[in-house]
Image (cartoon, rainbow, N blue to C red):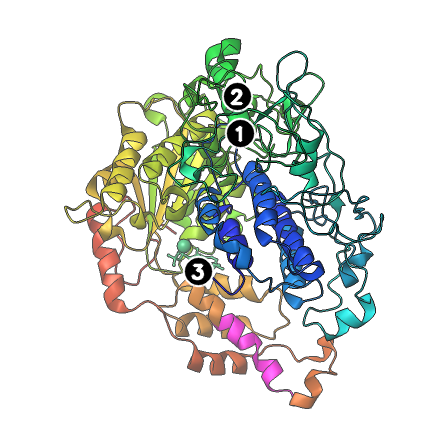
Amino acid sequence: MSEDPYLELSSRLKFETKSHPAPQALNARRANILLAHAYLGSRNPDWLASDVLETKLFEYANLVDDRSGINNFAASTLELTSKLRKDCKSWKCSLSLDGPNLKKLLGTVEGECSNTSENGCTAYLPDDVSLKEFGDFSSTENCTAHVPEHQNSIRSNGTTPSEPFQQPSNMLIRPHLPSSSASKDQNVTSDHKMSNFKVKRPALSHTLSNESESGNPSRSDHLGNGWNPYNSSVEAINNATVGSSVYFRKVPKRAKKWRQNDDEDESAEDPPPKISLVTNGSSKFGPTTNFGGANDTRSEDGRESSAYPGFRTAYQQLKIDNRKKFGNSGDSIGRGHMSEGGSNGYHPAKFIKKTLGGKGVVNSRFVSPLLSNSTNNDEKNARKPSGPELQEDEEVDERLKNIEPRMIELIKNEIMDCGSRITWDDIAGLHFAKTTIQEIVVWPMLRPDIFTGLRRPPKGILLFGPPGTGKTLIGKCIASQSGSTFFSISASSLTSKWIGEGEKMVRALFAVARVEQPAVVFIDEIDSLLSQRSETEHESSRRIKTEFLVQLDGAGTDEEDRILVIGATNRPQELDEAARRRLVKRLYIPLPDLEARKELICQLMKCERNELTPQEIEDLGHSTDGFSGADMKHLCQEACLGPIRSLAPSMISSIAANQVRPVSMADFTSALKRVHPSVGPEDLHQYVNWNNTYGSGSKAFRFMGDLRK
Ligand SMILES: Nc1ncnc2c1ncn2[C@@H]1O[C@H](COP(=O)(O)OP(=O)(O)OP(=O)(O)O)[C@@H](O)[C@H]1O
Ligand SMILES: [Mg+2]
């Protein structure tokens, strides 16, 4: 453990909760734990850190856990804490209220939160944390908290402190640090304002679920909102009446149970959840907690709604999924209600869907694929689910019912909007390729009634050729010109660290493409996905290839589906032969010929002041033989720097833009000394051979581009 175990715990908690759907709240809670530690450490050195640790970390466990106990984000930290329980009495606090550490931590919390939403950070600080006390954080206007009139608190191990805190009633936590001096000599920049750190305070309810008349545990006895390391537990315990029963939420086995006092041995059975309470001023029990985590509140209609909008626990997500699958009877499935718990008090859900800590669909950007079928957008927008509650009456499209919503969301993120408007004229040369693609992509969209039967466009096109010849450019042009749903897919969008997810992503891709058809799936560098299958390759990549081949043209594909897969590669020889068969049209994208090079120079230089004559352009066309489109672009960029380089360095800062001389042939001549072709003759030879063997275009000859003029 580091010199300050709290910091170690905090970083551990942070690490563990990285995948939590609402990390801001956790960061704030973590800050709260450290604030408590720092405050107690600086105000009363002999105060036992263990008590704060116990109270705060237990609440934290509630926050990070969810009812179902599936995503127990803080498992190992709680385990570590309970192990450290014994020796944390000796922990010395390295944090002090005016120390840089604490400000840095708070700054981190702000930093992490502030980049989560463009309009500043709406972090949720628990009710009992105020940042106003920390020097220059005082600019946060709506961030106040009052430490209440301190009552006699009782340590969680039953002893009463020698003297209660001498705490004036409305004292803010840090009265003694003059905010002006502190911020100067701290290594935290004083402009570290929290101004964009909008702090909202959800009605956080510390609950001690006393048995109410009805015999059911009441959900939320609000215990006041002052911050004090004990009121959330001991005060509540003190207030409970004799004979009332305190429910403890048993932290799932994996997170080890929480012992009330440290002389209890490890092996002791977990305390039963229903404990009668002795209220002679000493509390034998550790911190109380509520059932569903500190932020669960019940709204009037009894539906659970999280205190952090947008965040939904796995349990709530499960309920929605079950309702979809089993109708309303699904509600009873997977309910981990304590009050109905068996002898052990914790009732594991029967049909709970095991997730490996994966996020539920927490953001409301997810639109059910059914909606994407709707013809007009306003219906789509009108019915888009508002907030995290999905419309219960949504039925999922038949073709997507076996696909995980998370994957559908990921695939939808790969859909490229029209992006930059690139037209066919922006592509120099490549007349044969452009004509063929228009026949296959654009015309069938315009006249689907003509392009049926044998005239139906092929399912796959392969664009292959040397690098920098415009393959990706053609893909972008199809995206903006074809009027279909354009998926821009790369190997990374389909591979996943979890075994088996890659092929599911491929299946989800084609399922969503079917729903969104007519669709174009553009796979750049397709050789990285569909290279030759071999015995030595990794199992998961082989499965992704197989899934791809099945989806491209397998048993489940429907001839009527209007999905076009376009692959671009500059290594066609590495393609798997089954994939090659499925990419029916294999178009060779050659190096630009003389005309295309001249067209490229005119196109690239039309926005730059230049004094090139047609003859000079002709000469340049000849002297750039073997250049690819990207090389031509590089040459023009280099030539345009000529006039700038001819200026005296002192003039750079003062010269007006229109005084810079135009680009001349001399600039191109000197640029040609620096820019050389990026494709060698032997590389070309490979492409020409492959094209003559497998290509769909006309036989191309060495250095000759399109034959069709
Ligand atoms: N025929 C062309 N017409 C216009 N610009 C072109 C052409 N070919 C290449 N370019 C220019 O070269 C740049 C690179 O083109 P692109 O990315 O399409 O190459 P590529 O064939 O995808 O290369 P790679 O195989 O390495 O991915 C483009 O930004 C474009 O400006
Ligand atoms: Mg490319």
Q: Is residue 115 visible?
A: no
Q: Is mark 3 within 8 Å of ligand 1?
A: yes
Task: Please identify, in this view, whether the residue under mark 3 or under mark 1 is nearer the observer.
Answer: 1
Q: Residue at left 51%, top 45%?
A: 17
Look at mark 1 in the image and give the residue it sits on.
Answer: 249
The circle drawn on residue 338 is 2
Q: Which residues are magenta?
A: 635-647
Toward the left, the furthest residue is: 535
Which of the marked residues, 3 or 2, is nearer the chain's N terminus?
2
Disc 3 to disc 2, C-alpha distance: 74 Å
| Secondary element at image label 1 | loop
Kind of residue sitting beneath label 1 = Arg
Disc 3 to disc 1, C-alpha distance: 73 Å
Which of the marked residues, 3 or 1, is nearer the chain's N terminus?
1
Rendered-image quarter of ligand 2:
bottom left
Provide residue 273's location: percent of width, then percent of height: 51, 25
Provide residue 45's location: percent of width, then percent of height: 65, 61
The circle drawn on residue 596 is 3
Kind of residue sitting beneath label 2 = Met
